[in-house]
Image (cartoon, rainbow, N blue to C red):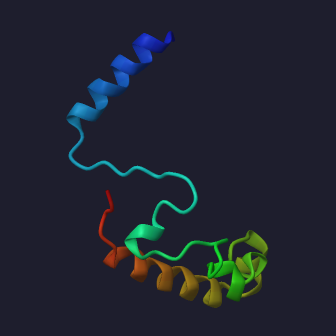
Amino acid sequence: METKKLIHKACTILKEVKTLFVLTGAGISAESGIPTFRGVDGLWKNYSAADLATPQAFRKDPKMVWEWYHWRQGIISKAEPNP
């Protein structure tokens, strides 16, 4: 499909949605108070990505992985959008 048609299709879909979430690159949420992963005080400074963010970690200790993601979800649910 050509670019112009894709853009038109995307615009048509976006006009009809009630809620829209936009996921972007690293660090964009820091201004909203959500800790980054690799910054100076990033989450991977205190936690190992291999211990929390891999299928192997989940198989090894699913309770710990679920608790960590639940903790992160709590932070994210309290955040406000930033400009």
From the viewer's side, name the closer residue of 75 and 70. Answer: 75
Q: Residue sitting at 41 percent across and 12 percent down?
A: 5
Residue drawn at point x = 50 percent, y = 9 percent: 2
Depicted 56 relative to depicted 16: above or below: below
Q: Where 16 sits versus 51, above or below?
A: above
The count of marks equals 0
Where is residue 4 drawn, in percent x and y? Answer: 42, 11
Locate residue 46, reporting x and y percent: 69, 88
Would you say 65 lies left or right of 60 here?
left
Q: Quadrant of the C terminus?
A: bottom left
Along the horizontal axis of the image, is 35 left or right of 10? Answer: right
Decide: is 48 above or below 15: below
- Identify the residue at horizontal 50%, vertical 51% (top origin): 24
Is residue 14 toward the left or the right of residue 54 in the image? Answer: left
Residue at x 64% of width, y 73% of height: 39
* Residue nearest the observer in this picture, 79 or 70: 79
Q: Residue furthest front?
A: 40
Name the image quarter holding residue 61: bottom right
- List x then y, in percent, for residue 65: 63, 83
Q: Is residue 13 above or below residue 70?
A: above
Pinpoint residue 25: horizontal percent, then vertical percent: 55, 53
